[in-house]
């Protein structure tokens, strides 16, 4: 049932504040602002490093997770798309743990990677939506993302719920490994607790602007997305979302890679979507944006209030989100990315919920 939405994808985008609060409350206690003990189903303290494997959007969630595990838990992370991971013959040892991220829990390559790691004696954790799935069944520890059924082929609420669970796991790992203090834990959990409310506000705030910008995007043949730090996987997720439902060619790049190739593509016909919260990477990303502007590129700047105030570069559009803590920025910045892809596809009249050639669950290699 789509309720009063035109597509499941739209419904699922607007469901995010609610389902994210379910995901958060499973792994956090908001009375004490602490991470719950259920994340200890993986013994992060005893783990030498973490291997993460997944496909598509779930892989991009894992890539954001990598930044968090390394930063907050000082836990080295090796991550790869499952179709490569399973054949890489990576040296693995039982002192490592492995995490598999999958909405459906049935993706063939992810399952094969899981079995490979299990065979090598690693402890297996699964971040899944479907709890009765094969990946869930074959894991030692299950971390449900609590997103509820996701019908639209393009993943939206599963992505942000995966991020919420990965944030909890990374902070829990940091707590177990003694790399974050009790005070930091309380502070970060407090920020995460505010996320559902901020998401609702942002969805309402940006909707009209996303719709009018999508009219412009729908005329383009190619779109480039740029980001740094956790905004780099978001840039790739933005490009993936746009290409899969609107069929516009899009690519996501690390902002610093711009001058190593993609800058050759910049002209007035290819919009560049720059994702840049006012974080410690902001100035670097803005200098990349400057390189785009200097070559006549049209910029869609997705930033926050502090970022909008700090950059004076001319843009085609600036999307101003509220200033939020770094730990929740990837979830909040997912919203304009999803809405831009959604409205662009609606303008173009594509089958938003059932894009051509794609299946919701990929059970063959
Ligand atoms: C993109 C998308 C796909 C899936 C991928 C993995 O919007 O939905 O890229 O993320 O096929 O699927 P799961 O998470 O079910 O393993």
Image (tube, rainbow, N blue to C red):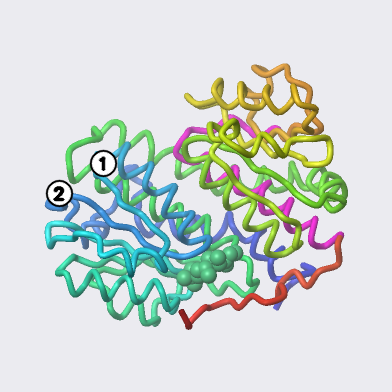
Mark 1 lies on a secondary structure that is loop
The residue located at (74%, 72%) in the rendering is 3
Q: Is residue 269 above or below residue 106?
A: above
| Label 2 CA crowd tier, 10 Å (few <14, some 14–19, many 20+) | some
Mark 2 lies on a secondary structure that is helix
* Quarter-of-image position of residue 10: bottom right
Is 120 situated left or right of 24 in this image?
Answer: left
Return the disc, 2 or 1, that comes first in the chain's sequence.
Answer: 2
Disc 2 to disc 1: CB gap under 8 Å: no
Beta carbon at label 1 within 8 Å of ligand 1: no
Q: CA distance from mark 2 to mark 1?
A: 9 Å
Image coords of residue 227 (percent x, y) = 57, 37
Q: Main secondary structure of the magenta part?
A: helix
> Which residue is denoted by mark 1 in the rendering?
73
Whether residue 25 is in magenta: the answer is: no
Whether residue 330 is in magenta: the answer is: yes
* Quarter-of-image position of residue 50: bottom left
Q: Magenta residues, as a range?
A: 320-347
Identify the mark at residue 45; answer none if there is no mark. Answer: 2
């Amino acid at each position: 049932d789509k309720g009063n939405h035109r597509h499941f994808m739209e419904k699922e985008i607007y469901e995010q504040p609610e389902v994210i609060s379910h995901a958060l409350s499973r792994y956090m206690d908001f009375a004490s602002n602490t991470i719950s003990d259920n994340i200890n189903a993986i013994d992060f303290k005893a783990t030498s490093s973490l291997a993460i494997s997944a496909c598509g959007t779930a892989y991009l969630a894992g890539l954001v997770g990598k930044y968090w595990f390394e930063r907050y838990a000082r836990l080295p992370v090796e991550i790869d798309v499952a179709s490569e991971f399973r054949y890489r013959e990576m040296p693995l040892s039982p002192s490592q743990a492995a995490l598999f991220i999958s909405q459906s829990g049935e993706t063939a390559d992810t399952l094969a990677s899981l079995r490979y790691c299990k065979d090598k004696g690693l402890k297996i954790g699964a971040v899944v939506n479907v709890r009765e799935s094969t990946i869930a069944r074959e894991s030692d520890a299950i971390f449900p993302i609590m997103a509820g059924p996701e019908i639209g082929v393009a993943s939206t609420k599963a992505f942000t719920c995966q991020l919420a669970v990965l944030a909890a796991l990374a902070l829990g790992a940091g707590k177990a490994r003694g790399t974050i203090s009790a005070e930091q834990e309380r502070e970060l959990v407090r920020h995460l607790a505010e996320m559902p409310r901020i998401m609702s506000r942002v969805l309402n705030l940006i909707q009209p602007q996303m719709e009018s910008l999508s009219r412009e995007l729908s005329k383009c043949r190619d779109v480039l997305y740029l980001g740094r730090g956790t905004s780099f996987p978001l840039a790739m997720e933005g490009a993936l979302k746009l290409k899969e439902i609107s069929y516009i060619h899009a690519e996501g790049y690390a902002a610093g890679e711009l001058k190593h190739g993609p800058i050759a593509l910049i002209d007035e016909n290819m919009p560049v979507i720059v994702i840049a919260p006012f974080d410690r990477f902001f100035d670097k990303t803005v200098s990349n944006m400057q390189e785009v502007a200097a070559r006549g590129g049209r910029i869609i700047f997705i930033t926050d209030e502090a970022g909008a105030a700090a950059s004076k570069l001319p843009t085609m559009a600036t999307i101003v989100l509220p200033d939020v803590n770094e730990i929740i920025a990837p979830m909040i910045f997912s919203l304009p990315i999803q809405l831009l892809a959604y409205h662009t596809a609606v303008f173009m009249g594509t089958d938003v919920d059932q894009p051509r050639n794609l299946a919701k669950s990929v059970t063959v290699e």
